[in-house]
Image (tube, rainbow, N blue to C red):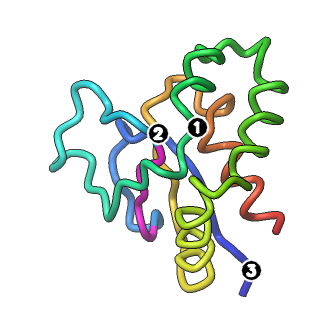
Amino acid sequence: MGRQITYRRVQEGASARDGRRVLVDRVWPRGVSKEKARLDEWLKDVAPSTELRRWYGHDPEKFAEFRRRYLKELHDAGHREAVDHLRDLAGRRRVTLLTATRDVEHSQAAVLAEWLNSG
């Protein structure tokens, strides 16, 4: 069975098709209660570094460079354990990566899902 990793906004309602719901943001989303989020876990250590997140500022024109830098970060020691954990989860069940970003297609969740699904 191949990896089944999807992504969506945490503000969207939970679905039975989500499988394991994992928040991949470094900071808790404003205005979202823990009950409403219906998370299985919050994996802060897989999120982009604070420096990269601030540099990017969710500017779609910077997305290609953000993607390149984030993929590089995912290989460093600070992200390795979280990445391995996600790979393990996805090998056993469907995983939905959650983010509070409005433009989910230009988010770390999209980059991470694509990268994990391809490897």
Disc 1 residue type? Pro
Q: Could you tell which of marks 2 and 3 lies nearer the N-terminus?
A: 3
Q: Secondary structure at mark 3?
A: loop
Q: Could you say where residue 91 lies in the image, as x and y percent from the top left?
A: 62, 82
Picture quadrant where residue 116 is located: bottom right
Q: Residue 112: image x %, image y %?
A: 67, 50
Instruction: List the residue tagged with mark 1.
Output: 48
Give the labeled residue for mark 2. 99
Residue shown at 30% from the left, 57% from the top: 39
Element carrying mark 2: strand
Q: Position of residue 8 (x, y in %)?
A: 52, 44
Magenta residue span = 19-24
Q: Per the image, is 23 magenta? A: yes
Secondary structure beneath dot 1 equals: loop
Which is in the foreground here, disc 3 or disc 1? Answer: 1
Q: CA distance from mark 2 to mark 3?
A: 23 Å
Q: Is residue 115 magenta?
A: no
- The answer for how far apart the CA atoms under marks 1 and 2 are is 12 Å
Which label belongs to residue 2?
3
Identify the image quadrant of the C terminus: bottom right
* Amino acid type at mark 3: Gly
Q: CA distance from mark 3 to mark 1?
A: 25 Å
Which of pointers 1 and 2 indicates the residue nearer the eye? 1
Side of 90 relative to 27 (left or right): right
Which numbered disc flags the more N-terminal residue, 3 or 1? 3
Identified by mark 2, the residue type is Thr
Mark closest to the chain's N terminus, 1 or 2: 1
> Is the residue under label 1 in contact with that under label 3 (CB below 8 Å)?
no
**Residue 29 in the figure: left or right of residue 102:** left
